Amino acid sequence: MFRLTDCDSIVSVGAQHPDRSLFDCLMPTPHGTTYNSYLVYGKDKTALIDAVDPDKADVLMENLRASGVERVDYLVCLHTEQDHAGSIALVKERWPALRIVATARVRDLLGTHLHIPASDIDVVAENDVLDLGGLTLRFLPIPFAHWPDNTMAYCEERKVLFSSDLFGSHFAESGEGEPDAEEIMTAARSYYSEIMMPFRGQIARYVERVKALGVRWIVPAHGPVWTEPDRILDAYTLWTAGAVVRKATVPYVSMHGSTQVMVDRLAQSLERRGVEVHLHNLGARPDSLTDETGHMIFDLVDSAVLILATPTVLIGPHPAAVYAGVTATAMKPPAKLFGVMGSFGWGSKAADTIAALTADLKAERLDPLMVKGLPTDADLAAIDAYADDIAARLDALGL
C-alpha cells in the first residue's frame, strides 16, 4: 500500500504511526498516520525524499540500515514542517557529505524552523532537474498546498510523482490486510477538508497540472500510494470545485437541554423539507470538541448550509461554539448560508460575538434565532419558519 511494487529503483523507508490519534493538536486521525520517505536509486547517485517526524526518527534510521543503502548523496526536502523534515539532522549525521536539495523557500524555512545552515543546501527552482544517473527528479513548486514552501518532485522515467502534502491522507497500515478503498478515500477527504480546502483555488490548478503529467503513481507524504491516480485526481476535481448539495451542517453545544431542543426541531423541520442534516454535538464527551469539529469540517466540503447553535455562557457564546466557528471560518468552506441559533438565561450577545468571529466566512447570513429559556410552542413554530426560509433559499439556488 505504501510501496511501489514493481519499481525496484524506488524503495519505501518511511515510518508508520498507527496510534497517533490527533494531528497538529487539531485533526482527529482515527487511522493514525504515516511519514513517507523514499530512497531513489540512480546509476550514479542516491536520493532520499524527505525525512520523517522526529518521533519516528529511529524507525527511519533502522529502515535505511535494513535497506542496505551504503551512501545517500542527496536529501530532497519537499516541505519544512517537522513531520517531513524533523529527522534531517540525524540523516546528515549518518552521511556528513550528503547535500540537502530544496527550493529557496524551503531553505529559508529550514533555517528558521530547524536551524539548518543554508550552506548545507543546494537550491533548486521550478523545473530544475536533479540527475541521479538514468533517473531524474524534476522540481515543481506548489505554494500554499498548504504552506508557501510545498514542492513536488517528478521522476519522469518511472512516472512517479512525489506530491508532498498534496493528495495525502492520515492512514496507517493496521496489519489486518488491505484496507477498504472507501475508508482510504474518506481519510483523503478528511485530510483535504482540514489542510487543503482553505486553498482550493490554488489546489484546483495543481490538480490540472498533475493530470497533464500522465503519472503512473502519486506518492504523497502521508498515507497510501495512489496506484490509480485518477481516483484521487477526480475526487480533488470535485472537492475543489466548491459545489455544494442540499445539506445542512449543524455543530452545537447544549448545557441544560434548551439548545438541544432547538437543534432537534430544526433537524426534523429541515429533513421534512428535503434537506440532509448532519448534527455535531461538540460537548457530548470530553473528546467531542476535537472529534466533532473534525467531522464538521469533513461535512463542510459540500454542505450548502452551516448553522452554529450555542447556549449563552454569561452573555457570550459557549467556548466550544467559538472554537467551531473560528475553525470553520479558517477552513473557507463553500457554504452558501450561515446562521446562528441558541438559548440564553437572562440576556445574550452570543450571536453578535459569533458574527464578529466569523466575519470572513463567505456565506449569506441568516438572521439569528435566540430563545430565552426552554423553547415554547411559539419558539418551535419560529424554528419551523426558519427551516422554511432555509429551504426556500436553497430552492432559489437550484439545490
Image: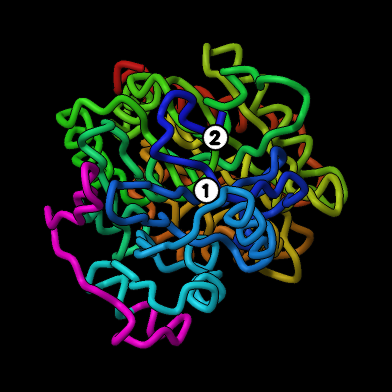
Whether residue 136 appears in magenta in the rendering, the answer is yes
- Residue shown at 56% from the left, 28% from the top: 1
Q: Quadrant of residue 173?
A: top right
> How far apart are the two marked residues, 2 and 1, measured between alpha carbons?
8 Å
Q: Residues within 10 Å of mark 2 (few under 14, many from 20)?
A: many
- Residue shown at 50% from the left, 62% from the top: 51
Label pair 2/1, CB-CB below 8 angstroms = yes
Q: Is residue 270 visible?
A: no
Q: Is residue 98 visible?
A: yes
> Split into 4 quadrants, where in the image is the C terminus?
top left
- Residue shown at 37% from the left, 33% from the top: 218
Image location of residue 89, percent across then percent down: 52, 77
Q: Amino acid at mark 1?
A: Asn
Q: In the figure, 14 relative to 193: above or below?
A: below
Near-viewer residue (220 or 262): 220
Residue bounds of the magenta highlight? 109-138
- Residue shown at 53% from the left, 56% from the top: 327
Q: In the figure, 179 relative to 343: above or below?
A: above
On the image, numbered disc 1 is attached to which residue?
Answer: 36
Q: In the figure, 397 relative to 315: above or below?
A: above
Q: Earlier in the sequence, mark 2 or mark 1?
A: 2
Q: Quadrant of residue 75?
A: bottom left
Image location of residue 27, percent across then percent down: 62, 51
On the image, numbered disc 2 is attached to which residue?
Answer: 2
Name the element at disc 2: loop
111 vs 222, left or right, is left
